[in-house]
Amino acid sequence: MKRRTSALSVSAAALLLAAPLLTGCAGDTHPGAAAVVGGERITISEVQSRAAAVREAQRATAQGDILVEETPALQRQMLGLMIFHNLVEQAAEDAGVVVTNREVQQERAALEEQFGGPEGLAEVALVGQNVPLTEDQIDGQLRVGLMVAGIGGGGEEGNDRVYTLLSSTAEEIGVEVNPRYGTWDVHQLGLVDAEVPWLRGPSEDADTLGG
């Protein structure tokens, strides 16, 4: 029987936005790919589309200019989150952790109650901690948060367990990243600027216009 997660506390499930990114480096082996995780491509167009949706939602708010200014590297942040999701899903499958739609909706309902309803939760998600999300992206983030909780089991030891498992998962299945988005730092478990002087990363125009 597969092990199911227990529900996260409301505070622990507050979107888990400070998610690390496990990556490697890639050349032109996978044209059009922002990253390849275990053979599964995350395309540049997918990253741009998600970032553009967030930009649109940000600009629709009263503090839109501030939110945009505070997230200048949105494409790279979004790619990091997408890779993190893929790694957590693989690690959860290997660990026998299952998260149901009902658990996700229960978690969302608890957060909506904490933050003053669906609109309040949407506002919190859009502001974010590291990576802002649209309202439509919240369920996916909560699902991953519940998976992480199931893998780790809680506490400091649980955090170490998650870190170790995600690191080993990344090494086992292989992760490549298009260097325009950065390169993998083994100590930070995240993206850092690629040491390629001539390489320009994705621009704000690319974030907003999808090009």
Image (tube, helix red, strand yellow):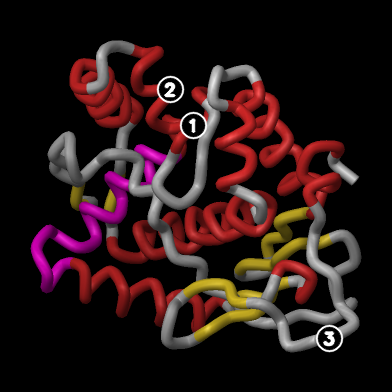
- Horizontal and vertical percent for residue 76? 65, 59
Percent position of residue 33, x then y? 80, 62
The residue lying at 48 percent from left, 87 percent from top is 186
Q: Residue at x 31, y 50 (%)?
A: 147
Q: Which kind of residue does numbered mark 2 sit on?
A: Ala
Residue at 55% over, 76% down: 173
Snapshot quadrant of residue 141: top left
Q: First in sequence: mark 3 or mark 1?
A: 1
**SS under mark 2:** helix
The residue stretch that appears in magenta: 141-158
| Amino acid type, callout 3 | Pro
Residue drawn at x 61%, y 51% is 78
- Cα separation between marks 2 and 1: 6 Å
Q: Badge 1 is on which residue? A: 126
Which one is in front, 75 or 87? 75
Marks 3 and 2, how far apart in space?
A: 38 Å
Q: Residue 157 magenta-drawn?
A: yes
Q: Which residue is mark 3?
A: 197
Alpha carbon separation for disc pair 3 and 1 = 33 Å
Give the number of callouts.
3
Q: Secondary structure at mark 1?
A: helix
- For the residues bearing labels 2 and 1, Cβ distance under 8 angstroms: yes
Q: Residues within 10 Å of mark 1 (few under 14, many from 20)?
A: many
Q: Which label number is shown at residue 122?
A: 2
Left or right position of 80 against 163: right
